[in-house]
Image (cartoon, grey):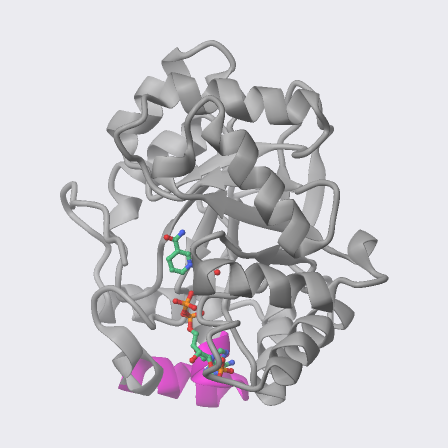
Amino acid sequence: MPIATVTLPASATASAITLPAIGQGTWHMGEGLAPRDDEVRALRQGLDAGMKLIDTAEMYADGGAEEVVGEALAGRRGDAFLVSKVYPWNAGRDSAIAACERSLARLRTDHLDLYLLHWPGSIPLDETLEAFERLRDQGKIRRFGVSNVDVDDLETLWSLPGGRDCTVNQVLYHLGSRGIEHSLLPWQRERGLPTMAYSPLAQGGRLRDSLLADPTVTTIADEHGVSPAQVLLAWAIRPTLAHPDGEQRDMIAIPKAIRPEHVRANAEALTLRLDDAALARLDAAFRPPSRKEPLDII
Ligand code: NDP
């Protein structure tokens, strides 16, 4: 069974790139909640299993998560598609350059594959855009994107010169939090802007971990011989209905996992395809939104 992939569109300076549709999150790594060696091992195991995208942020453990990622990537930077994020209050014309350089040092690399604005703040988007473009010109980032951004701010970004080079929007998305399906996802799909689904296992936002024990989810998992978490991931990255002729996907899920069995299961979900009947049962249990909802944010 081929693995599910997503193609990020070409931008002014980077060609299109196809990535496995499940990557690895790192929130809470580097906080001492788990042994550091386990965190490093988990990320390497995930890379070996094909989860090439690693998502981190200067915010996580105050840079500590980036240091864990740097250790995991020692000697194998080329195996990863590396994503980090800048705090909104560091996203100014000069402050974003300095923040990115600090991230690069912690990550022990000379470039990020993708740099995201973590969430919109008071610094105007055009200033952040200017900083991202400078970072790109300097070769410190290959692409830029945003996170926790709803339609209004995307409209603003789209109206700015160079704004359409934005490569992804990273937002909370899981079976129990489908609000983005009403307006945001259609907006992005119309413009070919892929989405990164954070907290795909529902560890944040509405419903939380009760999703893993939900009877519809567990029944479908049993029928497919997989785990509830794998059902949630396969659901999040399911092919888009907007393109019925092909296996087109535009959603990358980034579960965070440290336990080896979790890492293995998440990578295996890259080949899990839920049929239409299973998707319809999940729709019946977790209704898609019928009107615009505020963006769910952790
Ligand atoms: P997730 O939904 O990924 O859940 C993580 C939890 O699920 C961990 O406790 C993990 O356990 C457990 N888990 C992982 N895999 C499995 C599995 N196969 N079966 C059962 N349990 C499993 O939550 P996060 O909130 O961490 O979101 C994922 C990532 O998204 C973050 O790490 C971060 O990179 C990004 N993010 C971005 C945000 C933003 O504002 N842009 C906000 C929040 C998250 P264990 O670790 O013990 O294996």
* Res 150 seen here: yes
Given residues 289 and 143, the one toward you in this image is: 143
The answer to whether residue 49 is above or below residue 81 is: below
**Image-based side of 204 in relation to 74, left or right:** left
Quarter of the picture for ligand 1?
bottom left
Image coords of residue 14 (percent x, y): 71, 27
Residue stretch in magenta: 215-230
- Residue found farthest to the top: 161
Which residue sits at x=73%, y=72%? Answer: 44
**Image-based side of 83 in relation to 32, left or right:** right
**Helix, strand or loop for the magenta stretch, by majority:** helix
Look at the image and tell me in which quarter the C terminus lies: bottom left
204 within the magenta span? no
Image coords of residue 276 (percent x, y): 44, 63
The answer to whether residue 128 is above or below residue 81 is: above
Which residue sits at x=52%, y=23%? Answer: 131
Which residue sits at x=55%, y=48%? Answer: 84
Look at the image and tell me in which quarter the N terminus lies: bottom right
Image coords of residue 224 (percent x, y): 52, 83
**Image-based side of 2 in relation to 223, left or right:** right
Given residues 50 and 182, the one toward you in this image is: 50
Image coords of residue 280 (percent x, y): 34, 65
Q: Residue 4's image quarter?
A: bottom right
* Res 246 seen here: no
Which residue sits at x=56%, y=81%? Answer: 258
